[in-house]
Amino acid sequence: MSKVAYINDKAYPIHEGETMLSFLRRHNGKKSVPTLCDAANLEPFGSCRVCSVDVALQKEGKTKAMASCHSPMQEGMYLYPDSPNIQKLRKNIIELVLTDHPLDCLTCEVNGNCELQDVAASVGIRDVRYPEGENHLHREKDLSHPYMTSDLSKCINCYRCVRACDEVQGEFVLNMAGRGFDSHIIKGHDQSFKESDCVSCGACAQACPTSAISDVFESKSVAKAEKTRTVCTYCGVGCNLEVSTRNGEILSIQAPYDAAANGGHTCLKGRYAFKFYNHPDRLRTPLIKRNGKFEEATWDEAYDFITDKFKQLIADHGPDSIAGISSARTPNEENYLMQKFMRAVVGTNNIDCCARVCHSPTALGMQRAFGTGAATNSIDDLNYTDCIIVIGANPTDAHPVTGAKIKQKLMKGTMGIVIDPRKIELAKYAKYHLQLRPGTNVALLNMMLYYIITEDVMDKDFVAKRTEGFEEFKQEILKLDMDELASITGVDKELVKEASLAYAKANAAMEFHGLGVTEHSQGTFTVQLIADLAMITGNIGKKGSGMNPLRGQNNVQGAADMGAQPHQGAGYLDVTNPEINARYNTFYNAKVPSHIGYKIPEMFNAAINGDLKALWLIGEDVVQTDPNTQKVMKAMDSLELLVVQEIFMTETAKHATVILPGASFLEKSGTFTNGERRVQRVKKVVEPLEGTKSDGEIIVDLMNRMGYPQPPYTPDGMLDEISQIVPFFEGITWDNLGDNGLQWPVKKGGVDTPMLHIDEFKRGLGKFTFQNFKESVEVETHGKDYPYIITTNRELEHYNCGTMTRRTGNVDILTEDVLLINPKDAADNLIEDGRMVCVESPRGKVDIKAFITDEVKPGVMSSTFHFPEIMLNNITSDVHDSEAMCPEYKVVMCRVRKSKGKFKQLV
Ligand code: SF4
């Protein structure tokens, strides 16, 4: 028999550990108890007391008013939420709040959508009996920031903004100053939003119950506009967004509190960087280059131009003279169609996507070790972990919502280990920061594995029952010389030992890694060693553990799942396997090739060699973002046909023969798969801009014109086709994805999988593999003449090439790429902070502004490639990971000097 308590003497079941407020709202409805300081994603606070209810421990017993938001339920309690005593108390509280609040509701931005106004009305306040206070009159508005605004005359001191900044984002920018009636919110050291360390996540604005803190889009004032729930396009966290529209225009974005991926939170990209969608720079008509100039064309002309050329090339040079690069920013359904076009229509496996230049080593390394190349656990497992190890990733910048969650855990005492050449934000909160030299991950991980074995802290039971290859692996590890590896990595061996033991001894340790692992010549081997580390400590198949790659672009997981890669078709099925080939042939009703196609770097080489004649590229600015820009441009210019499907005139589009204007994620429907394998629905928020088409529609149009009968694009229809060929999508339908999606593999009936490899690995036993450290070719070849290492990174405000964010207010917050340089290196080269410097590598040179910081060690520099004005990839190297061909962006040998000039190509 379940436990019960009483509301107005009527019995209701109680849930273990719930508060009075949740009990009352569960049974009487969300609006049954008014609140002010309470918010869905914040800890109970109990300061305003508006949620007070009368409580008796027995029927007709003595009642006591208690704040329901933080008071736990007990069996047999009697709650009277609307007693005369409580009604009077609430009215008094709200009256007092209103005495120092401007009573100008009619002209207030949030009139009609103000929580204070609602609560005042619900407790029956029409007039305030007390004289109006004056403190609020002295509060100035803050309009300094591109997104955030404040008018603290409207503040009711509920602390929701302060708590959101602390509890959700972990930034501690907002605080309360003064006493009594003079209590007021301050930002930083009583600064403006712009001057403070605010990261513009908007958590405070969403939390504020009045318009004291808001945003320039007045998000709360449009609460009654039409709403569409969709998924952010900027990173692999996959935050759900609630987009408000009116008359086909986007007004603002908020974060749904019930979203599994982000629980009411976003970063500034997801919440605020949406104004690109109808920017004047959007491409609005197909363009064909004739005599070196782009000319406007109709869709029919563009389609005819492309299909005529494709057919001619297939006839003259065979299908492998054509290649496609699909987009990790477009939905699964469009990626699926693109690879289907290449395989079933053209007849080539020359299809790849940007996973090649970010997490291809993760997929390959994890497939080798476990059989599946995707995150083993869910982000929610952070709530169950005792140790977090972050390797080569900077989540607070690149995956901000997950980064904020990790930061919260570390601040609250969870053991943290950061392995990164830069002093990233999380390194400040982690117990161990192993600040290794770029390119030495393999050496450092081998040190960790050595200490775990020699100190006898491994999980012998897990290794014996769940893995293979351990004895050979162990023998190799034991041959290693720790002093030598310490010297290679630049990290004290005792520190490595301590961190290794901390990781191994944790009950459950959770691993996260990013491009600082994969973008190396030993990227795949590093991933395999991380898998070794997880297996040797038994950190697989249990809550709060696992190996969790932080996928970069929003749908890079999905693009690979859908087969946008040259060796595996949809569902990671091996294209060279005759049985699989027969299955694809039957399913697509076409002859699909069984030899592996070109990976992206091989496409560039083939274009330069003349073997590749045509490239169709969707939403991928390879000229700006792929390494060794000059080589990429040469490849683009060597093609007979370059089709670029884009929303803006990118650096790559400038080299195109034909440009097809695509629709943005806000203008189409489909699904994205986030970094924890969560397949979520992307829903059309506004109609595509006039003149543009969704990528799915364009691909289907071209399929039909090439003679392949493909039905019109619909997201549910495509998902249905995908579920028939991709084994782990078997149980997914458009409808059963619901609001929070499903984590693949999904069985028939919609049963999903938050955690992989619980009882056995996909490949049966997990495979240990030893990998020895090998110095990067870049260091060995050029280290003598180019003494510094540049390692590339990302900043919070922009994603990779920043085509979209540069057309939003984000560009007013972060205006340019800079070079992070240690004070010693700056002094050695007579470089002052903020001065232009020339950075030269064996590939070329760029001019960039110096930013002097101890975030990097002497000898190491760091920069981003968000801005085409700098084009940092002119200096990066196209040396690749030996296995997956992911470029080594993280180890670029260079020299540096003062300069005023611009980029010059070396001859
Ligand atoms: Fe969330 Fe990433 Fe979008 Fe930021 S960029 S809102 S963290 S999905």
Image (tube, rainbow, N blue to C red):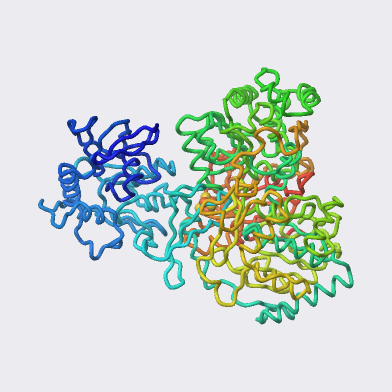
Where is residue 253 drawn, in percent x and y? 44, 59
Quadrant housing residue 869: bottom right
Residue 549 appears in view: yes
- The correct choice, above or below, for 83 with respect to 415 in the image is below
Residue 891 appears in view: no
Q: Residue at x 68, y 47 (%)?
A: 359
Where is residue 158 drawn, in percent x and y? 28, 45
Q: Quadrant of the N terminus?
A: top left
Q: Residue at x 28, y 39 (%)?
A: 68
Where is residue 16 drawn, in percent x and y? 40, 33
Is 219 on the left-hand or right-hand side of 672?
left
Is 224 on the left-hand or right-hand side of 537?
left
Nearest the viewer among 877 and 441 is 441
Is 164 on the left-hand or right-hand side of 492?
left
Nearest the viewer among 350 and 765 is 765
Q: Quadrant of the C terminus?
A: bottom right
- The correct choice, above or below, for 601 with respect to 71 in the image is below
Nearest the viewer among 172 and 159 is 159
- The correct choice, above or below, for 701 with respect to 192 in the image is below
